[in-house]
Amino acid sequence: MASELAIQVENLGVHFRRNRRGGRSLKDLFGGSARRTRPGEFWALRNVSFDVARGEAIGVVGRNGQGKSTLLKLVAGVLLPDEGSVTVHGGVAPLIEITGGFVGDLTVRENVRLTAGLHGMSKAEIARRFDDIIGFAEIGDFVETPYKHLSSGMKVRLAFAVVSQLDEPTLLVDEVLAVGDKAFREKCYRRIDELLADGRTLFFVSHNEKDLRRFCTRGLYLDKGALKLDAPIAEVLDAYNADYNR
């Protein structure tokens, strides 16, 4: 039943132009699928379908350039599909880029208020959670510092600290945690464990097999923009490793 699903993806497709996002003209929109791929364009994803149940932890694997991060952006609503549909039941807490939607010229304090507010957190709730966010990010000395002056590690810590405080039912995590130091990654992973224990849904893109086995019970293997395998995470990783080592 749809009420038991967190994400529904049906015949999903998105294409790009080389070096920039593909735009579609009116002729393309009404000219059928044959017109939708023009010279210099390629399908990043096509004919991808799957459902994610509430509370599932899904790991997305595949070589670079196979559509993993594109899929996360489609689920997050950052990109719109050219074919098919993505339906998300409830909101998402996306950690899919280091910037996390933060504004470079605003201070850390202003960015926390802005980002949390855009995700529906009230002013009172932001004020109540602000110290916890800053404490988790370990950047108490930089609250009034413009975001653009933070190091990459600080940006990751701040982004995760804000996103993990959101009450959205689905957490989207890309490779960005790889930028943080080992101690902070373990801190983030403990927080992810807590969210999963609370019944949240996890959509996790990573090349780290240990992390995928730790968090995920099911895997999606993307290859050349297609969903090659949807199976238990151990089976997906075995298939991916077998292909990669050929």
Image (cartoon, helix red, strand yellow):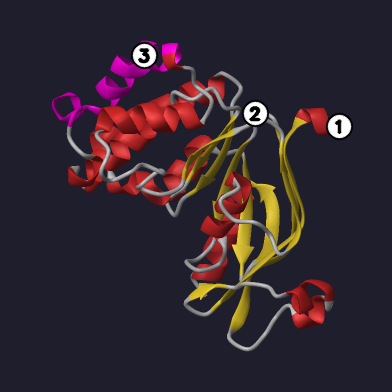
Q: Give the number of the disc on residue 55.
A: 2
Q: Nearer the viewer, mark 1 or mark 3?
A: 3
Vertical order, 208 against 172 (above or below): below
Residue 222 location (% of width, % of height): 61, 62
Residue for point 38% across, 34% down? 160
Q: Please provide the residue range marked out in magenta.
A: 124-144
For the stretch drawn in magenta, the main secondary structure is helix
Asked if residue 128 lies left or right of residue 106, the reply is: right
Vertical order, 173 against 161 (above or below): below
Q: Could you say which quadrant of the image residue 207 lies in? A: bottom left
Cα–Cα span, label 1 and label 3: 38 Å
In the rendered image, the quadrant that contains the N terminus is top right
**Residue 29 visible, this orientation:** yes
Amino acid type, label 3: Ala
Q: Are marks 3 and 2 in contact (CB under 8 Å)?
A: no
Residue 21 location (% of width, % of height): 55, 70
Magenta stretch contains residue 128: yes
Identify the residue position indicated by label 1 in the image.
1
**Residue 185 visible, this orientation:** no
Residue that extends furthest to the bottom in the rendered view of this protein: 39
Identify the residue position indicated by label 3 in the image.
127
The earlier-in-sequence mark between 1 and 3 is 1
72 or 229, nearer to the observer: 72
Residue for point 19% across, 42% down? 150
Residue for point 25% across, 44% down? 105
219 or 77, nearer to the observer: 77
Cα–Cα span, label 2 and label 1: 14 Å
The earlier-in-sequence mark between 2 and 1 is 1
Asked if residue 100 lies left or right of residue 78, the reply is: left
Q: Could you say which quadrant of the image residue 35 lies in? A: bottom right
Residue that extends furthest to the left in the rendered view of this protein: 141
